[in-house]
Amino acid sequence: MCTAVALPTSELPDIVVEQLIDRVHTRGGEREVRFDWRSVPALLPVWWNGRLQVVKWGNRDRSERKLPPTGWTWRETVEKGKWSAIEPEPVEVPAAYVMTNGVWFRVKQGVRGLLVRTRTGEPVVYLICEPSTRYYRVMTRATWMPVLIDEVI
Amino acid sequence: MTTFVAHLDADCYYVSAERVRHPDLTDKPVGVLGNNGACVIAKSYEMKAHGVKTGTPIWDAAKLCPHGVYVKRDFYWYEVLSRKMLGIVGTFSPRVEYYSVDEFFFEAIPTSHRTDLPGTATKIRDYIREAAGLPVTIGVARTRTLAKLFSDTGKPFGAVAVLTRDHERELLAKMPVTEISGIGGKRADRLAPYGIRTCLDLADADGRLVNKLLTKTGYEIWLELNGTPVMPIRPERPPHQVLARGGSLMGNVDDPKLLWAWCVRHVERLIEELRYHNVRTTTLAIQLDWKDGTGTGGTTSMPVPTDRFDDLLDAARTSLRRAYIPGATATHMHVMATELRRAKGFQLSLFDAPDPKKEKLAATKHAINEKFGRFKVRSAATLYLPAVYRDPANDFDICDIRGKVCF
């Protein structure tokens, strides 16, 4: 399961980077913001309503009773319409690097997510997953992989 | 007048190629993963500094270098940049050998009467960096063997011209004999009892002794080490003696249906090569590697040279049956055409009448795949390999880059 995504700070608005300063890391001299599932609160960047925003990732703290207490959903579940009652929106989660089981790998654009709202209207995003390709399974030892945008790994 | 040979070697080529299209990877520890995603096939200097080597399994590499970034190989892209580099080098030299995807040999000629060979090497290196975005190292010397050895001393992003014997001897004295391409552990073991440990030891050894110990190949290396060019620059790749396709079966395969599907896939790939090189074969061999480390082979001869799918499939069936061990688990398969004939002008058999209908069918399949992409029309036997065909990266392998002298 994908547990973190990273995006260079140059691709995020300065004000967002300032708010997330404790999540800024340096890799090879370049600063990047790491959005880690283990961070509190767990957050993800999403393209939503035409702009890049940082929203809550999943419902790990179980603060919302009607939402599943995870950060991922299956593509099959989405396609079967099991989320339709709460009016989900497909969103893109921009990322340069994605981490699964300790392996960081480069992605071209990012991964697909599903955005829903809590009863108070707060946006929450879930990463959409599908069964791993053989290559991905060997690379990360994960049986599920995030749905990548216009890319096969 | 002495002619000089230049050897160009791209620095950690696959990583550099990825950095051309993903500049954010610059200065980061980067590893390119191989066909199965299991091993690092190329690493950046930053990743190498953490102890990751070529061939390191990904799970070990991730422990050695937790912040390293891994990339899936893309041989299409590596060929694009390789040919771009080749084109650039061709503007500096009339004779260029496409040795491998990231290595060329070429005749070193000063770019102008005011530029010496060291200056020329630097100029070509800098121009490639500017025009293709790739860091390369260039070595110039009297022979190919020397140029290749000296370019290694200049890495990364170096330009080394070794033009005098004294300078050659100084560098050769520091290099173990195993640095020479073609001298591996076994050959080095044969040389060691005679006190030959460095390249200079080999160069100073008696040529007759070298011939006796290492045969003609070793003797040619000895001549090259002493500045006598033996191996010419080959602007055209010499015709293939054997064509082969194959490799890893992407896991353990014990199901005969899967094994047959792989065999058919490799036969289809082999036919593409036969047609491209305008040759046919009278022999089809299959080599299987088994999980216990053993290997078996099977060969079938055909009366008439062919590149047709139905003929080669029949031969493959027989060869595979000969190589197959019931119940055993295979890991690798290679399908080889070992007796090649030019496609025109061969002797027909008395008993095999030409079959224009099947010829047309083969031509149609080839034409469709040429126009719409590889494997758009393929044998139904390969339907047992959905994961292989679903990933477009599997459509193109390093061996599909044509015209290289070396693999």
Image (spheres, grey):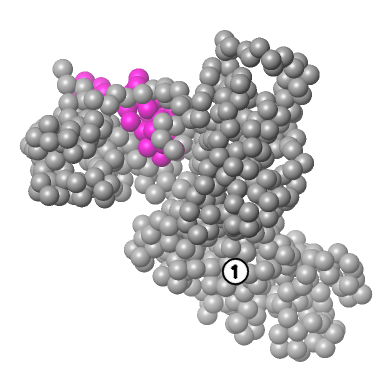
Q: Which residues are magenta?
A: B85-114
Q: Is residue B358 above or below residue B138?
A: above
Q: Is residue B111 shown in magenta? A: yes
Q: Is residue A108 left or right of residue B105?
A: right
- Look at 65% across and 72% down and name the residue there: A1
Q: Is residue B136 above or below residue B42?
A: above
Q: Which residue is denoted by mark 1 in the rendering? A: A141
- The kind of residue on which mark 1 rests is Arg
The residue at the far right in this view is A85
Q: In the rendered image, which quarter contains the N terminus of chain B?
A: top left
Mark 1 closeness class: few <14, some 14–19, many ≥20 residues within 10 Å: some
Q: In the rendered image, which quarter contains the C terminus of chain B?
A: top left
Residue B254 lies, in percent from the top left, at 64, 57
- Look at 17% across and 33% down and name the residue there: B211
SS for dot 1: loop
Foreground residue among B261 and B179: B261
Please give the chain letter of the residue carrying mark 1.
Answer: A
Q: How many marks are shown on the rendered structure? A: 1
Q: Quadrant of residue A104?
A: bottom right
Q: Is residue B172 above or below residue B141?
A: below
Q: Is residue A150 shown in magenta? A: no
Residue A66 visible, this orientation: yes
Residue B209 lies, in percent from the top left, at 12, 36
- Look at 57% across and 63% down and name the residue there: A139
